[in-house]
Amino acid sequence: MGVREFNDIVNVPFSSEAFVAGVLAYFLDNTLHKKDGAIRKDRGKHWWDKFRSFKTDTRSEEFYSLPFNLNKYFPSV
């Protein structure tokens, strides 16, 4: 791969305003204080807390189980 191809690979996404806005929003969103409860709630992080561990939700095993009781041979976690 030459310099021209690399230049094209870099220029195509960064010439899109939506891509640049998304990258900037992602960067700014992740630089906020993560310990502040109001910011966590505003970002929706509190909703994902219950899904961080497979064992915290009792429905996880039932939801992710395989048909014909194959989950005893191929466990989910």
Image (tube, helix red, strand yellow):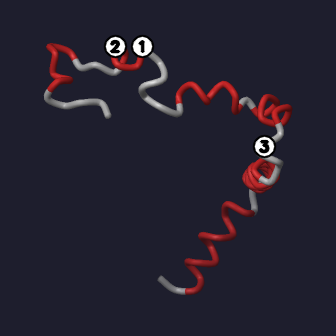
Q: Identify which amino acid the numbered label 3 is placed on.
A: Lys
The answer to which of 5 and 26 lies nearer the viewer is: 26
Q: Is residue 50 left or right of residue 21?
A: left
Label drawn at residue 59: 1
Q: Which of 37 and 13 is in front in this view?
A: 37
Closer to viewer: mark 2 or mark 3? 3
> Who comes first in sequence, dot 2 or dot 3?
3
Q: Which of marks 1 and 3 is in front?
A: 3
Rendered image quadrant of residue 14? bottom right
Identify which residue, 25 or 58, lies in the foreground. Answer: 58
Q: Is residue 2 left or right of residue 37?
A: left
Q: What residue does disc 2 label?
A: 62
Label 1 and label 3: CA atoms lie apart by 29 Å
Q: Which residue, as the protein is rendered here, is positioned at the far bottom?
A: 3
Q: Regarding mark 3 in the picture, which secondary structure is present there? A: loop
Label 2 vs label 3: CA separation? 33 Å
Quadrant hosting residue 48: top right
Callout 2: few (<14), some (14-19), or many (20+) C-alpha neighbours within 10 Å?
few
Kindly identify the residue that appears in the image at 19 percent across and 31 percent down. 74
Q: Where is residue 27 in the image (x, y as percent from the top left)?
A: 76, 55
> Who's the residue at 43% across and 14% down the image?
58
Cα separation between marks 2 and 1: 5 Å
Image position, residue 66 (x, y; %) = 24, 20
Q: Is residue 55 above or below residue 9?
A: above
Secondary structure category for the residue under label 2: helix
- Please report contact status of discs 2 and 3: CB closer than 8 Å, yes or no: no
**In the rendered image, the vertical position of residue 64 relative to residue 16, given as above or below:** above
- Which residue has dot 3 on it? 35
